Image: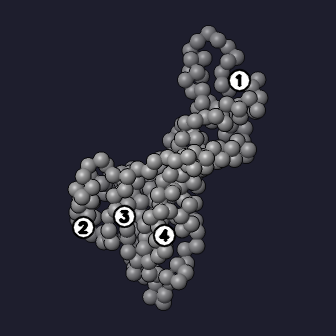
Amino acid sequence: MSGDATGGKYMTKKGRNGVIDVWWLDDTGGLTILLPNILRKKWHWKNCSIRLYVLSDGTNVDVQKSKMETLLHGVRIKIETVIIVNRPKVKEIDLQNAQMSMDQIMLNISEEELDELFVNVYQKDAIEDIDGDDEGNSPTDPSKSRDEKLAVVGNFQKEVERIAYKSAVGRLIKDECRDDTLLVVCTMSFPHIDVPATVHMTCMDVQSKPCKKPFLFVRGTQKRILTMDS
């Protein structure tokens, strides 16, 4: 969680007065919406309302919104409104931000992280090398210098595109924030094993930084207690 959570001018003797923006970006079991609801049980937050943002599933917006409102009413989670948003499109600024982030990663990356990212670039080739008769061509070949690895990894478009999309999501969250938004609660992306930790943390950074609000990433245990399909 980052940012100043004092509430500033929205903090009174009766607690905070403002909005908690919840971005339920994928169906991870419902903790993203359950946690803000629990937070409002505390007197500091009891006067705050919740705005829920959900990505469009491609169906009729009014139908999707009605289903979500019915679900939340059924589990007694009171919200101000449900807002259905389209997946953001990656723009040139996002690609630029992503490339700058990758450049920063390359500048500070450790040898272990570099090897991990380098293997991801050549994962298919690595498997073929293991199965084949060639020797000495493995991506983890110790004869390859750090500069050689950096030259390849720096152009790894898959990771650049991943970061660029998160940058686009961050812009969307920023555009939707209001002056009285006190806290942003957002579903954290699943930390896939094939995504280096440095890249995963960079994705979280470019997604949370633009709105300049206290930002809380949430991810549960994947147990489907409260789901979007309930």
Counting from the top left corner in percent of width and height, residue 173 is at: 47, 60
**Apparent side of residue 63 relative to residue 141 in the rendered image (left or right):** left
> Residue 141 has which mark?
1
> In which image quadrant can residue 220 be found?
bottom left
Instruction: Give the CA separation, mark 3 to mark 4.
Output: 12 Å
Instruction: Give the CA separation, mark 4 to mark 1.
Output: 47 Å
SS for dot 4: strand
Name the residue beneath numbered marker 3: 52
Name the residue beneath numbered marker 2: 73
- Residue beneath the point at 58% across and 60% down: 209
SS for dot 2: helix
Indicate which disc, 3 or 1, sits on the residue closer to the N terminus. Answer: 3
Name the residue beneath numbered marker 4: 183
Instruction: Look at the numbered discs 3 and 4 and tell me whether their residues touch, using CB distance below 8 Å.
Output: no
Amino acid under label 2? His
Amino acid under label 4? Leu
Counting from the top left corner in percent of width and height, residue 136 is at: 70, 17
**Front-lying residue, 64 or 183:** 64
SS for dot 3: strand
Amino acid under label 3? Leu
Instruction: Give the CA separation, mark 1 to mark 2.
Output: 58 Å
SS for dot 1: loop
